[in-house]
Amino acid sequence: MSPVSTAPAHLTNGDAELRARYLEEVLGLLYPAPCTLDEKQRADAGPIAGYLVVPDARRPRLLVPTRSRRVAAAAVRHYAEPQSRPARLKRDAVVLALRSGASRVLLRDRIRVTGPPGSGIDGYLRRQLDTDLALSVHIGPARANRKPVLQLISPAGETTGFAKLGVGPLTRRLVRAETAALTALSHVDLRHLMVPAVRHAGQWHGHQVLVQSALPVWEPRQPLRPDRLTDAMREIAACCGISRGWLATSPYWAEMRDRLAAVADRPEGAVLAGAARSLAARAGDTDLRYGAWHGDWAPWNMASLGDRLLVWDWERFATGVPLGFDALHHDLQQRIMSDGDAAAAVEATVRQAPLLLRPFDTPPGTAELTALLYLIDLATRYLADRQAEAGARLGVLGTWLLPVLIRRAEGYQ
């Protein structure tokens, strides 16, 4: 059991409060000095951007450009597809209000940015892409890897791309990693899924910038067939080749030891490293197959359309991991999303590992080992990213992941 089972008091603020704090932070990143967010204007400055705050400044979710009704409505309609019917109804009501002009009454919180022409992030993107555009800005939940994510919208209301900004050591690394992953995948003939294309990569005010093409996530969805999802995951697993070898002597385990050593000075890290050593001592001579994985293949990072499976957010893509990690991750995230009991979800995913990994030709005798290696990998990521310190909802591993992993690893035969 992890010695730390609860978050520090200052990290237990509500999601709305954390988003509200982030709103001011992200605007300062996108519109640095000499830009201002008030009505005061110098002789050399004028309005360069305007936003509506949806639903309001106390609970911000999305900044919508005020450029035109068409652009504002597209910003909401095309950003993402809500996962539930009530959420879709709320989204559609906001779209209708923006199209009709009723947003002047319903959406009262507005932000006006002033500054020299072209001085904000939108000016930079217009120059790099050589096109006119407006931006909407997603205000996400507290996570260590949270970063500005911008939807690029044409004057006609078409979503032409998405931009990400890496603004700190972790997020800069992730944006660079996603750029590399999408570049590599552009050379792979993918038949079962579609991924974004890189439109621009560069740096602006010290931030790492990635602009990628827009996948049509707003098109009508189709029920996701299990075989279709499996085919796509198998395709990614094999896209950079497949190798095999004993766990103890594999490049994967050598890298994992280094990652565990990097977090071993923290209480959870020491516990996690002990569980990993215990598992390796029992299963080091197990022969495994290794391939690639998306790294965060969750229901909210994909969409099933009539003729294609769209998958985005490739910043965790990696090669040389035990086959089937994507299937385990998708199952775990789906279970957490469905019932909210993360510890029970971990236990259920481990139990279902033989069935989940069968399409990857994983022998039943090594399915539990693969699942436990996935949990070690995920836990190490959470600790290295300092998700608990960032206030992430599942950042404190002692409340859900570590107890199951430690019990299973110590009892592994």
Image (spheres, rainbow, N blue to C red):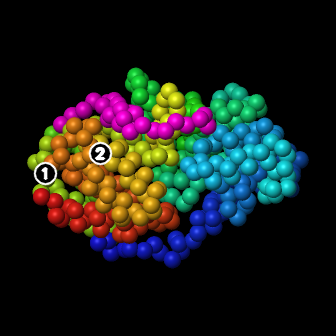
Disc 2 on helix, strand or loop? helix
Who is closer to the viewer here, 142 or 105? Answer: 105
> What residue range appears in magenta?
218-244
The reply to whether the magenta stretch includes residue 109 is: no
Kindly identify the residue that appears in the image at 77 percent across and 51 percent down: 52
**On-image quarter of the C terminus:** bottom left
Q: In the image shown, does 386 or 344 lie closer to the viewer?
A: 344
Dot 2: within a 10 Å radius of its alpha carbon, few (fewer than 14), some, or many (20 or more) residues? many
Is residue 226 within the magenta segment?
A: yes
Q: In this view, does 275 lie above or below 64?
A: below
Label 1 neighbour load within 10 Å: few <14, some 14-19, many 20+: some
Q: Is residue 4 left or right of residue 35?
A: left
Q: Can residue 33 be seen in this view?
A: no
Q: Residue 356 carries which label?
A: 2
Q: Indicate the amino acid at tag 1.
A: Gly
Q: In which quarter of the image is residue 165?
A: top right
Residue at the spot of label 1: 284
